[in-house]
Image (cartoon, grey):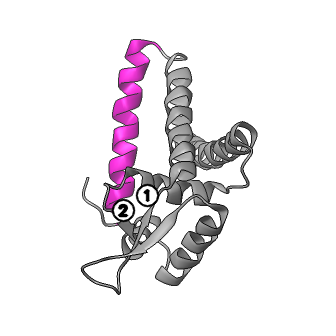
Amino acid sequence: MDTFTAAISNLLVEIYYDVLRLEELALKKDTKTNLSINEMHLIEIVGYADEEGVTISDLADRLHISRPSTTEAVNKLKRKGFVTKKKCEKDGRVVRVYLPAEGKKIFAYHKYYHRNMVKALCSEFTEEEQAIMVRAIGKLNDYFKRSVGEKS
């Protein structure tokens, strides 16, 4: 492995775990909740859904986990008061997930946290470096999307 490849490999792994750890630490510190970062990401998906909520199947697809695992995660968050479930009026087999007030507060906090994190990160770079970074991360994102079979 050449020096560039080794450096990129190490950086990608470090960044991935550091971002997750940073988010989870901030979540626990700032909101005093016992949410994991995976639970926060589930809340985030529900938060970005329209007022019709999101189905368990859609959540499972977006989270890339099985439907039974998604149902279990949703039920756990329901017990904690961060999501609600309701059967679809048109098709009783379909369950939709929504955010109650407590879930909306956590979702708003997460968006606020991301915005501030990105703002702080961007302040470290010149405009030229920012433009290069956007292009480079865009290519990285395209590569990963292609690798998992999504369109860029």
Residue 6 location (% of width, % of height): 59, 46
Determine whether 98 is above or below 10 in the image. Answer: below
Q: Amino acid at mark 2?
A: Gly
Q: Are marks 2 and 1 in contact (CB under 8 Å)?
A: yes
Residue 98 falls within the magenta-colored stretch:
no
Q: Comparing marks 2 and 1, which lies closer to the viewer? A: 2
Circle number at residue 137: none
The CA distance from mark 2 to mark 1 is 7 Å
| Residue toward you, 132 or 22 | 22
Residue 85 location (% of width, % of height): 47, 70
Q: Earlier in the sequence, mark 2 or mark 1?
A: 1
Secondary structure under badge 1? helix
Residue behind mark 2? 53
Determine whether 23 is above or below 80 in the image. Answer: above
Magenta span: chief secondary structure: helix
86 left or right of 123 in image: left
| Residue toward you, 23 or 87 | 87
119 left or right of 150 in image: right
Q: Amino acid at mark 1?
A: Val
Residue 72 appears in the picture as rendered: yes
Magenta-drawn segment: 126-148
Residue at the image point whose x is 55% and y is 41% from the top = 110
Residue 1 appears in the picture as rendered: no
Circle number at residue 46: 1
Residue 138 falls within the magenta-colored stretch:
yes
Residue at the image point whose x is 41% and y is 21% from the top = 130
Q: Quadrant of residue 35?
A: bottom right
